[in-house]
Amino acid sequence: MRLPAEGSAPGAAAATSQDVAVALDGVTRRFGETAALDDVSLSVRRGELMTLLGPSGCGKTTLLNLVAGFLAPDRGEIAIDGERVTDRPAYRREIGIMFQSYALFPHMSVAANVGYGLRMRRRPKAEIARRVEEALALVKLAGLEDRRPRQLSGGQQQRVALARALVIRPKVLLLDEPFSALDRNLRGAMQVELKQIQQQLGVSTIFVTHDQSEALSLSDRIAVMAAGRIRQLGTPDEIYRRPSDRFVASFVGDVNVLPARLEWIDGATAVVALGETRVEVPARPLAGTTIGAPVDLFVRPEELRVAEEGEAAVHGTVAAQIYQGGHVDLHVDVQEAASGRVLLRVSGHEAMARWPAGTRIGIALVADRAIAFSRA
């Protein structure tokens, strides 16, 4: 089969066939009249953690189920380790899967749950016992072999599910929103553990989530999806700092949208005017835009600050303060903003006293890290 070119989505980089663990080539899957996936090509490199990120209904879980073999594509090809598996049943794809619900057998012990896949593969009992012991040690559950799932915490149940997925030594690990049922603190701890285990084993992993912070913190690369297509493929920093379009810029992380005007383009750099302030931005998203045309400037909250006298790009009134421990979020009513409000992320608790609600402030850009798109 023809492997999809990594350049088929913005932010992609070249990869040889030897580097590719999973390849989707022109894959389409419809449910009735709805295209859940529409001509998607994607390559997952060996040993990387690839995250599928997007809103509900964007096609990310459908893509995962196609790789797993639970669904068949209407068109296109799927390969794992260079072998075509488009028509191969799920049990012959050497895939490890961890579901959102964990799907543990309640009547089985921890050890029996973890060893289930090996028993289905008719591995010798001694080998099963050894590999189960190794898997439980890997997920820090040694000593809990005889417990039932109901005797475990949510985090422990998740570890059992992860051990069960890994014990078969899969070619690819598939994770379908595995942290959604955990509380915030436990979710953060498990994210760290999962990344460490994934890196230790070097297992190629496809991770599905709608949580942007989760995707940014865990991934080697992220495929941002919407309406059955990949809108951008890149590293977390590329996705966050250099979004390819308005959807990605709006969906990933907090962002402010301010009206500006295109002043000039010179090679890879453009300059837009925000009030009396001139801001350098990448030229690519503005290709074809007429000089002098209105554009929308997308600026992250951490790239704004309360302005000193005479340097403000826009002005507004503090509507609310949200204390976040290490920083304070200032919500400022700004007439020019697309939403009517701008979010500033200000370090230091003294912000609470300096800029209480009702304070009139100016807002300046910290650095030229914004991006602009033609007015929609």
Image (spheres, rainbow, N blue to C red):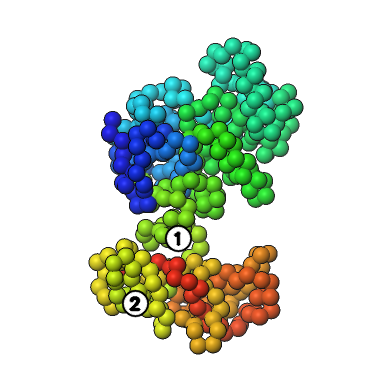
Which residue carries the number 1 mark?
A: 241
Q: Is residue 174 left or right of residue 225?
A: right
Mark closer to the chain start, 2 or 1:
1
Task: From the viewer's side, name the closer residue of 201 and 375.
Answer: 201
Which residue carries the number 2 mark?
A: 261
17 over 232 or under it: above or below: above
Q: Position of residue 226 (x, y in %)?
A: 39, 50
Q: Is residue 344 left or right of residue 229?
A: right
**Which residue ends up furthest to the bottom in the rendered image?**
310
Task: Tell me which amino acid carries mark 1.
Answer: Arg
- Circle 2 Cα neighbour tier, 10 Å, few/some/many (<14 / 14–19 / ≥20): many
Q: Position of residue 347 (x, y in %)?
A: 63, 70
264 over 77 or under it: above or below: below
* Residue 364 appears anywhere in the view: yes
Q: Is residue 149 left or right of residue 305?
A: right
Q: Residue at x 28, y 34 (%)?
A: 2
Q: Position of residue 88 (x, y in %)?
A: 38, 23
Q: Residue at x 55, y 75 (%)?
A: 305
Q: Quadrant of the N terminus?
A: top left
